[in-house]
Image (tube, rainbow, N blue to C red):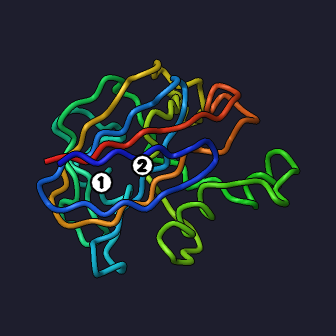
């Protein structure tokens, strides 16, 4: 039986999934980043690691067939389908300090670190999610640029859970840059068999 969740702009949600279930993340209006994090159900010390994912896939990019790994080098998710082909594995969740550093407006600003921590009931000091739909350009000289997302309204990525998981997903709160195309909108998640 399918379950649908709407994650409103600048908020987060926790969703439990079982091994074998599919997770469809949909950019409802287009140009919106979803900060996607996961813990092993019942064992929060095992969690999604973008660093291990880069290491195991030997790539800075996700594509159909890519596997997302935990900090213990175990498969957590497999990418089955992807409309966009551009997701970020480099940036940590936005947080008060990031807003202070770049925009001098961190006090009271909604942010993905707090939204995911709140949804999972934890207090991780930093979270490195897979930033779905985020377009980070990696230049030849090693510098990076955050560009407008390539995702259009209704674009999606579908993953299969390889273990029982607790997801923490946030609809990114950055409206100050091209990260979300200058405005924040909802993300839809569908869980199915």
Could you tell whether 10 is left or right of 7 in the image?
A: right
Judge by depth and name the residue closer to the eye, 124 or 17: 17
Which numbered disc covers residue 110?
none
Asked if 118 appears above or below 110 in the picture, the reply is below
Instruction: Name which residue lies at 48% across and 57% down.
Output: 13
Judge by depth and name the residue closer to the eye, 12 or 71: 12
Instruction: Name which residue lies at 46% across and 18% down.
Output: 152
Q: Position of residue 43 (x, y in %)?
A: 30, 81
Q: Position of residue 17 (x, y in %)?
A: 25, 60
The CA span between labels 2 and 1 is: 10 Å
Could you tell whether 151 is left or right of 104 in the image?
A: left
Asked if 26 appears above or below 53 in the picture, the reply is above
Label count reads 2
Asked if 111 appears above or below 70 in the picture, the reply is above
Q: Which residue bears the numbered disc 2?
A: 130
Disc 1: CA contacts within 10 A as few (<14), some (14-19) or many (>=20):
many
Could you tell whether 21 is left or right of 71 in the image?
A: left
Q: Secondary structure at mark 1?
A: helix
Q: Which residue bears the numbered disc 1?
A: 53
Could you tell whether 116 is left or right of 158 in the image?
A: right
Quadrant of res 40: bottom left
Instruction: Name which residue lies at 51% across and 23% down.
Output: 30
Q: Position of residue 53 (x, y in %)?
A: 30, 54
Residue lying farthest to the front in this orientation: 1
Instruction: Name which residue lies at 31% across and 63% down.
Output: 16
Contact (CB < 8 A) between labels 2 and 1?
yes
Give the label, 2 or 1, closer to the camera: 2
Disc 2: CA contacts within 10 A as few (<14), some (14-19) or many (>=20):
many
Q: Position of residue 6 (x, y in %)?
A: 46, 43
Q: Secondary structure at mark 2?
A: strand
Q: Earlier along the polypeptide chain: callout 2 or callout 1?
A: 1
């Amino acid at each position: 039986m399918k379950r649908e969740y709407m994650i409103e702009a600048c908020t987060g949600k926790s969703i439990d999934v079982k091994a074998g279930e599919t997770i469809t993340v949909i950019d409802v209006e287009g140009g919106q980043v979803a900060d996607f994090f996961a813990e092993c159900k019942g064992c929060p010390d095992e969690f999604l690691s973008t660093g291990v994912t880069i290491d195991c896939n030997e790539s800075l990019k996700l594509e159909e067939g890519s596997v997302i790994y935990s900090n213990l080098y175990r498969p957590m998710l497999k990418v089955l389908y992807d409309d966009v082909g551009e997701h970020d594995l480099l940036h940590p969740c936005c947080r008060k300090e990031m807003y202070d550093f770049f925009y001098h407006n961190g006090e009271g600003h909604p942010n993905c670190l707090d939204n995911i921590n709140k949804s999972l009931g934890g207090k991780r000091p930093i979270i490195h999610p897979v930033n779905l739909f985020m377009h980070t350009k990696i230049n030849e000289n090693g510098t990076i640029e955050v560009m407008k997302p390539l995702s259009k309204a209704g674009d999606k990525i579908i993953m299969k859970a390889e273990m029982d998981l607790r997801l923490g997903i946030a609809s990114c709160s950055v409206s100050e840059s091209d990260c979300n195309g200058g405005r924040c909108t909802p993300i839809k998640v569908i869980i199915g068999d």
